[in-house]
Each structure stands twice: as structure tokens, then as C-alpha cells.
Image (spheres, rainbow, N blue to C red):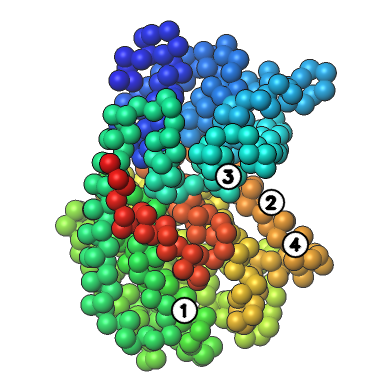
Amino acid sequence: MLAAASAADGGTFRNVELINLLERLGVSYHFEAQIEDQLRLIFEQSLSDVTERDDGLYSVSLAFRVLRQHGYRVPCDAFHKFKDLKTGEFKECLRRDVRGILSLYEASHLRLHGEPILEEALSFSRQQLKEYSATNVIEPHLAAHIENALICPLHKSARRIDSWRYISFYAQEESRDETLLRFAKLDFNFVQLMHQNELAFVSRWWRDTGLQEKLLYARDRIVELYFWATGSHYEPHKVVSRIAAAKFAKMVSLVDDTYDAYGTPEELQLFTEAFKRYHLSDDMRLLFRAFLKLCDEMEEDMKKEGRCYGAHHAKDAFKELSRAYDTEAKWLASRYTPTVKEFIANGIPSSSYGVISAAYFIGMGEDMGIKEYEWLKTNPTIDTAAKLLGRLLNDIMSHEDEQKRGHCPSAVECYKKENVVSDEEAVEAIKKMCDDAWKDLNEECMKPTPVGLPVIQHFLDLVRIITFIYIRNDSYTHSGSLKDHITSILLESIPI
């Protein structure tokens, strides 16, 4: 289907459109090799057809986004032709091109450091999309699509959730391909059945640990945590990663609740030391034993595959997390507000995403070998940026509630004190840090990469589900806000 289109007039762009459609409908994992081959050919042989010779805002923006999403360093110079030479602004006539403006908006989120034309494109397109939403002059299904994009652009969206939304949107498009739409619906429902079986398995594991009845201070949230794992890594072949991530995320949640709500400073110090030395503390032995048992089970499974280094990495990540939590507990006990630099240095490991990543890596097979684990030891920028985003996005949405409950200072409090600014100014400054971290992520995804695409893709998908969890509020703490999404993604099939 892809190869045949490339030979016809305009086939290059039709291939890009088809690739985008397959990805947005959530079925591109069936065609990964073909998609990569086509994009490589387009980048090497036909790039000018869709970025220089084509004058359409929609097509240029779409090709730019799709290629950059796959790591191709497409120059952003093509967007200059859409600016008025006299005013230096984007051309007035573009405002009438609704889908072109939306395509430009989505493309602008693939920007790297030092690309002012894309900063301008984001500002221009976002303002125009807001005007469309306010005037009710476009089709209702397109208006809803635009509203979702303004809340969270495609590049930052959890793929499984976006696919569920896009199937509904595409079903209302006049140009839809009925066969492809039916295939997407069937595939969604088939994968959902797999996820339901996995959720039942993870729920039984959690019940069998006995911790739910014994650690009464801890939040349950096993369904939410599995939903989290599914939203970021939904494809059928990632089953081991999903289950490992859900289990380790549950352990992280228990440790987080222990440090936040239960342990005294002395008990928490013992707990941290236990993680460092791997022997039991008296007061929290149940949780510690459960963690060790989980690590042992994972290690045994990996040995069967001839890989035992992943479980060791997970243990190291947990030790680092416990040290970071212990530091936060000490800050709270002493009423100390760290500098922003101090906070970030501790906040990167306290985000917990080092442990979550380690769990995902356990299920990645040959894609995550010794070379990749050695690379992780160098603290690559993509890993640091993902953890930083996890920490800051959490703090932006949860800091007010946490301060009421008596929590250590968040990034917001640290920035406020250090710079003597208001809450609102601190939040805006932290959002700018997040914006810069996204540019770091985008840069690290550009080819050639030091490790394979599945590893790089993991970090993007992890940040995407984090973004979803914290886009409106702290959805993990206020889990009721996830109810409708959990129902749609995990429980209710899409009508055929």
C-alpha cells in the first residue's frame, strides 16, 4: 500500500498522509518496517517534494512533523515561505486554512533549541485555533479535535488515548477509508481484550501480596497504575514491560505513601539504609520483603532469557529513589527550602521514573542489552529530561494540595523563595523549564541515536503518559478524574 503510492504523482505526500493516519489510528505497529523504509526514502530522495516545492501549509507541516517524529532532522526553513516579506508575520490568508493551521500547530511542538520560526509558528497557530474554538464556525467534530489539541498537542499525547479519540474523529470525516476505520476499531478492541486479561493478572498479584490489608495508610490505585502502563506502551508485544511497570509502579506508590504519610524520620532513615544494604528494617519489613520478592521474580525471568542485568538496574534505581525520598523527608522535618538547583538535583531521582523505566526495560528483550544499560550509566540527556519533566509536571499540579497536607517544598516553593516571586510567576518559570526539557527530548530523538528506536521511544511515551496524568490536575491523587478514560480504554469496546 505504501510502496505503490510512491510511484504515482503526488504519491510521496500520500504516503506521509497514510503513515500519519496509521499512527493516529493506533495500528502503525503492524507496519513498522515498511513505515521506516518509506520515511527513509522520502528523507533521502524526495524531501524537497513535500517541504520546498509544495506550497500547502497542511502538507508541509504534516511532512515536517511525521519525519521529525521518526528522528529525521528536517530543516524548518520551509516555513519561512508562509511569512509575509513586508510584515515579517505569517500571511493573513493562512487564517482561512483551518486544517493547515492545526497541522502547523502540531508541527511546532517538534521544535529544537534555536528555532525561532517554530516559536513564532506555535504562537500564531495557537492563537488562531483559539479563535476558531470561540467562534463556532467549523464542523463540531473538528472543533472538538482542535480543543483536544489545545489542551495537549499530539506530540505530547499518550498514544493509546489519542488513538481512541482519533478513531471517533476519523469516523466523522467525509474522506474516511471505511476499511481502514473498521480495521482500527477491530484492532483496538482486540488489544483491549489483552489489556483486560493483563489487568486481571496484575490485580491478582497485588491481592496475593497481602499488602492491601496490612498497609492501610497506602493508596490502592492498582487499576490506575496499570492504565498508566497501558497508556504509554499499549502494543501487544510489550506485555512484559506493561506488567513489570505496573508492579514496580505499585511498589513506588507504596514507598511514596510511606515516606509521605506514615514513617517517622527515624523509621524512614532505617528504611533508606535497608535499601542501600539490602537487609530488613524492623518497622517496614513487609514492604521491603515485597520489593525484594518482586526483584527476585523479575531476575529469575530474565535469567531464563540469558539476561540478568535488568533486575540489578531496577534495584539500583530503587536505592536512588529511597535516598531522594529520605532527603525530602529531612527537608520537611527541618523546614528547609532548598535552592532550585538543589531541588532539581534531588527531584530528578525523586520523580520515581528511574524505577519505572527500569521496569519497562526488563520487558524489552534484545532491544535493551548490555550496551544500552552501559549507555544509561552515562546519565543521557533524554533520561534526565524525562525525569525532570516528570518531577516538574507533578509539582505544577500538586504543590498546593501537598503544602496543605504538610509536604516538603516543591519546585514552585523553591523558585518562589529563591526569586521572590508570586505563585503564578513561579509556575510560569517552571513551565518554561518544561518547555526547554521537551526541546532536549526532541533533540535527543534526532538520528543518529546512540541506542535503538525502541529505547528512545520509551522515554517519549513515558513523558506522554505523565503529561496526561498531570494535564488538568494530579489525576493520580484525584483518581476519580481518570474514571471515564479508564472505562473507555480498558473496559468499553468501540462499536463496530
| Residue denoted by label 4 | 424
What kind of residue is marked 4?
Glu
Earlier-in-chain disc, 4 versus 3: 3
2 lies above or below 401? above
| Residue denoted by label 1 | 257
Question: Which part of the image, by quadrant, shows the N terminus?
Answer: top left
Q: Distance between the residues labelled 3 and 2?
A: 22 Å
What kind of residue is marked 1?
Asp
Graded by Cα atoms within 10 Å as few (under 14), some (14 to 19) or many (20 or more), the crowding at tag 2 reads: few
Earlier-in-chain disc, 2 versus 1: 1
Q: Distance between the residues labelled 4 and 1?
A: 28 Å
Q: Mark on residue 432?
A: 2
Q: Which of marks 4 and 1 is in front?
A: 4
Earlier-in-chain disc, 3 versus 1: 3
Graded by Cα atoms within 10 Å as few (under 14), some (14 to 19) or many (20 or more), the crowding at tag 4 reads: few
What kind of residue is marked 3?
Glu
Secondary structure beneath label 1? helix
| Residue denoted by label 3 | 147
Q: Nearer the viewer, mark 3 or mark 1?
A: 3
